[in-house]
Image: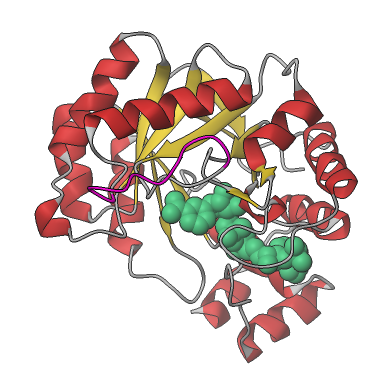
Amino acid sequence: MSTERWTFGGDTSVARIGYGAMRLTGWPKGEPPARDTALGILRRAVELGVNHIDTSNYYARDGIAANELIREALHPYPDDLVIVTKVGALVEGADVARPAADKTGLTPDNLRRGVEANLRSLGLDRLDVVNLRMGDLDRSLTPLAEPLETLLALRDEGLIRHLGVSNVTAAEFAEARRIAPIVCVQNLYNLSRREDDALVDACAAAGVAYVPYFPVGGFQPLAAARLDTVAARHGATVSQVALAWLLARSPNILLIPGTGSPAHLEENIAAGALRLTGRDLAELG
Ligand SMILES: NC(=O)c1ccc[n+]([C@@H]2O[C@H](COP(=O)([O-])OP(=O)(O)OC[C@H]3O[C@@H](n4cnc5c(N)ncnc54)[C@H](OP(=O)(O)O)[C@@H]3O)[C@@H](O)[C@H]2O)c1
C-alpha cells in the first residue's frame, strides 16, 4: 500500500487506495463472490491499510447487501475507518423499497430514508461522508439545490459528518459548493473515459477529493495496446497501470476499485507502489 493520504474536510484522513463494495453484491448485475470470500476481502482490505470503503444501502440483491457484509466483517469498526455512502439513486435494496410514485430518491423523505437506512444497516450513529447521487433522472426536472439542502439539514441534525456529490457536471459542482461544504466528487473517470478532466482539476484547485468510479473500467474492463506495453515494461497488470495512472493524474484522486477476488484486491492495493515514468505517461496519452 502506498503511504499517500488525503484528508476529507480537514479532519477525516484516508489512504489514497480504498475499496468499493458494490461488486460484493452482484448489484446491479454479475455474480457476487461467496459470502465468506466477501467477508474475507473486506477484512483483508483493512489489514492492508484500506480505511476508505465506498458503499450504499442500495447495493443489495438477492439478500446480499454491501452494508450488511461490511458490518459483519468489520464492526466494531476501527477508529480510522471511513465509510462513504450515497443517497439519491432510485432506492432499491434490502431495507428500503423503491419509491413508487415519484421514482426518485431525491425527495426530502426519500433522502432521509436513504440516510437512515445506511445508518441502520451499517450500525452507525453518524455517517462519515454521504454523497448526493444525481443521475438516472431527467436533470431539467431535478435540480441539485433542494436535495443538497435536505442533506445539509440532516448533517446539521448530526446524522452526517461530511457531504459529497456524485454524477454531477462541473456547473453542478460549482453550484453545490455555493450551498454546502463539499468534500468529494464521485463521477465516472478512468484512462479511457476522461470527460471529467477539467472537473478533476477544478476539484484539486478547491481542495476537494475526486473519487472516480469504474477506475479499472467497471463492467467493461479497460483494454488497449498502450496499456499492455506499459504493464509489460513494469511487470505489472493492466489494472495496476490504470490505477497508478489515476494516482499520478492528480493528488486529489482517491481510488475505490471494486473486486470480488482476493487476488485482485492484493493486486489493486499493490498498484500504490507502481511509479509510472514520464515515458509511460506520455504513451498512455
Ligand atoms: N456513484 C456512482 O454512481 C457509482 C457507480 C458505480 C460504482 N460506484 C462505486 O465505485 C466503485 C468502483 O466501481 P466498480 O467496482 O463498478 O468498477 P471498477 O473498480 O472499475 O471495476 C470492477 C470490475 O473490475 C474487475 N477488477 C477489479 N480489479 C481487477 C484486477 N486487478 N484485475 C482484473 N479485474 C479486476 C472486477 O472483477 P473481479 O471481481 O473479478 O475482480 C469488477 O468486475 C464501486 O464498487 C462502487 O462503490 C459508484
In this view, 48 is above or below 7: below
Nearest to the observer: residue 182 or residue 230: 182
Chosen colour scheme: secondary structure
251 with respect to 278 (left or right): left
Residue at the front extreme of this rendering: 100
Q: Is residue 100 highlighted in magenta? A: yes
In this view, 106 is above or below 135: above
- Residue, x 72% and y 42% (percent of image)? 2
Dominant secondary structure of the residues highlighted in magenta in the image: loop
175 with respect to 130 (left or right): left
> Where residue 16 sits in the image (x, y, percent)?
61, 41
- Residue, x 33% and y 63% (percent of image)? 196
In this view, 154 is above or below 29: above
Per the rendered image, the range of residues in magenta is 94-103
Rendered-image quadrant of the N terminus: top right
> Where residue 198 sits in the image (x, y, percent)?
28, 60
- Residue, x 50% and y 67% (percent of image)? 190
For ligand 1, which image quadrant applies? bottom right
> Where residue 283 sits in the image (x, y, percent)?
56, 82
